[in-house]
Amino acid sequence: MTYTLDNEAGVEDVETLVIGAGPTGLGAATRLDQLARSFLLVDSVSVAGGLASTDTTPEGFLFDVGGHVIFSHYAYFDDAIKRALPNEEDWLTHQRVSYVRCANTWVPYPFQNNISTLPMDLQLQCLDGLILAAEERGRNASFKPTTFDQYILRTMGEGIADVFMRPYNFRVWGVPTTQMQCKWLGERVAAPSLRQVVRNALTKETAGNWGPNAVFKFPARDGTGGIWTAMARTIPPKKMRLGEHGAVARIEAGKKVAVLQNGQRVRYKNLISTMAVDGLLGCMGQEEGVEGMQTAARQGLVYSSTIILGLGIRGTRPDRIGDKCWLYFPEDDSPYYRATIFSNYSPYNTPSSSASLPTLQLADGSAPQDSEPADGPYWSIMFEVCQSEQKPVNLETVLADTIRGAVATSLLLPTDQIVSTYQRRFDHGYPTPTLGRDAALEQILPVLKDKYGIWSRGRFGSWKYECGNQDHSFMLGVEAVDNALFGAPEMTLNETDWVNGRRNDERRL
Ligand SMILES: Cc1cc2nc3c(=O)[nH]c(=O)nc-3n(C[C@H](O)[C@H](O)[C@H](O)COP(=O)(O)OP(=O)(O)OC[C@H]3O[C@@H](n4cnc5c(N)ncnc54)[C@H](O)[C@@H]3O)c2cc1C
């Protein structure tokens, strides 16, 4: 189908312009292509994937933007990734092996079901809190928590709050749990059964495998980014512009024209923007009504930055690491809240053992005795560090601090040989579910859509962490298209609990 408007010289016309070739933009483009509609997908970065892309160090180690695991709530999403990566050998399947580092020990995830592995004083602290919380729920059955902190105290009590939930969540979000709402939680935080916790504490049993991603699959090649570069290959190249020719500089929303950095003007009927909504409002300049939305965004939308660090290490994977996947760190002996043993996800996430690499340093910070290149094998760890106004990070020292932390938390031995390092900061990393978020979004998203024909969607386009994973993001794009073209409801954005609560067991991987 071709789409034409009365042409203004030098202006390109499309029915739908999609800004951003991350999962949301690719979801929109996939749907538009399926419907054979007129569209253009643009991104300022030359490789598709956005926050779900993968970097490779000069030495050949791959690192995602933090631990990415797919758990799909949608058949449409499953079909799309199957089309993008159709072969059995494109994927590897893993059992989640996840722990929390606490009191110099590894507590199996989820922490609250496995306190039996803690030293006795911490077990007592946690159990005391759990029992008092159960009593309080009995006394005050109708109380509905508003803040994340109240939710934690009500379901887990003061002990688990102080030992794990409060410190860990501050390290993830960069704001205290008292400043966060709890509506976003849904299936993400395991509510413990007091009976089970007490039984496990007495019998010394552990309870694992809670939650949606006990088994997960991961691309064999090219990391998580491999999914999205493959997805981008399913979109006709003439409908996609990536790199400097795809950068949007300005949006003349009244005229429904996007101006690219190279001066090219693109006129649209519908705009699906997946860039961060605060950035989008910045691009809209002085249009009527924009200032009010900018104020709402400034006052109500909070985010934290994510710093990803990676280490490539020479040697066979040590027994102390085993088949661990991702690990949580609530204590302050390291700067990171999460570490992923990325080499466990695919053998192609590290260079082959025949690659000859010099040692850059030992894990204790000392210079290697021998700086000549030597063979592998290799393994790797990826770390995530949160940076926010309330949780500053020294970018000059964070890599050295991470390596020191890795030794302190027994991920590395002081003598381990580091052959590759990686550090990259992503300014918008986590959209924070603060108390003021929903009121701000109410003042922004409907106005953009109804007044300007702009569907701002995606992890930061619609700023809802609870529907900000890859599957959600992809479907936010698909559903935005169906809403723009046919008026269909956007279930992921507006009925997130329903989407997340749906059990697609038959579709689990
Ligand atoms: C640390 C971390 C861990 C995560 N873990 C998981 C996980 O375990 N499982 C999971 O499913 N998901 C996870 N995610 C979420 C996943 O990365 C997101 O779902 C996804 O990347 C969001 O997609 P998006 O398309 O909405 O936004 P983005 O990926 O941010 O894409 C937006 C795109 O817009 C482009 N853009 C911005 N401004 C402009 C402009 N002016 N002109 C042109 N283009 C522009 C950007 O270059 C970018 O490519 C994680 C994310 C992070 C940061």
Image (cartoon, helix red, strand yellow):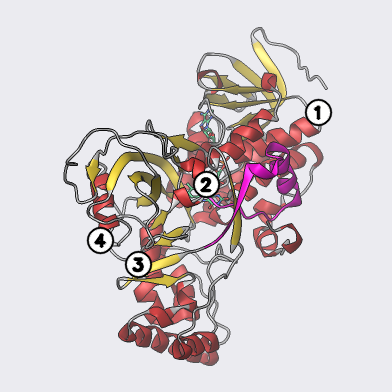
Dot 3 amino acid type:
Pro
Dot 2 amino acid type:
Ser
Q: Residues within 10 Å of mark 3 (few under 14, many from 20)?
A: some
Dot 1 amino acid type:
Ala
Instruction: Look at discs 2 and 3 and give the one toward the viewer.
Output: 2
Q: Residues within 10 Å of mark 2 (few under 14, many from 20)?
A: some
Say if the magenta span includes residue 104.
no
Q: Earlier in the sequence, mark 1 or mark 2?
A: 1
Q: Residue at x 60, y 21 (%)?
A: 241
The residue that label 1 is drawn on is 36
Asked if disc 1 and disc 4 are in contact, CB closer than 8 Å, the reply is no
Q: Earlier in the sequence, mark 1 or mark 4?
A: 1
Q: Residues within 10 Å of mark 1 (few under 14, many from 20)?
A: few
Q: Residue at x 78, y 36 (%)?
A: 485
Query: Can you tell which quarter of the image residue 95 is in?
Result: bottom right
The residue that label 2 is drawn on is 346
Q: Earlier in the sequence, mark 3 or mark 1?
A: 1
Instruction: Look at discs 1 and 4 and give the one toward the viewer.
Output: 4
Q: CA distance from mark 1 to mark 4?
A: 56 Å
Across and down, in percent, residue 498 comes to: 70, 62
Across and down, in percent, residue 40 comes to: 67, 24
Q: Residues within 10 Å of mark 4 (few under 14, many from 20)?
A: some
Q: Nearer the viewer, residue 295 or 42?
A: 42
Dot 4 amino acid type:
Ala
Across and down, in percent, residue 487 comes to: 79, 43
Q: CA distance from mark 4 to mark 3?
A: 18 Å
- Residue stretch in magenta: 68-96
**Does residue 486 appear left or right of residue 194 in this picture?**
right
The residue that label 4 is drawn on is 408
The residue that label 3 is drawn on is 167
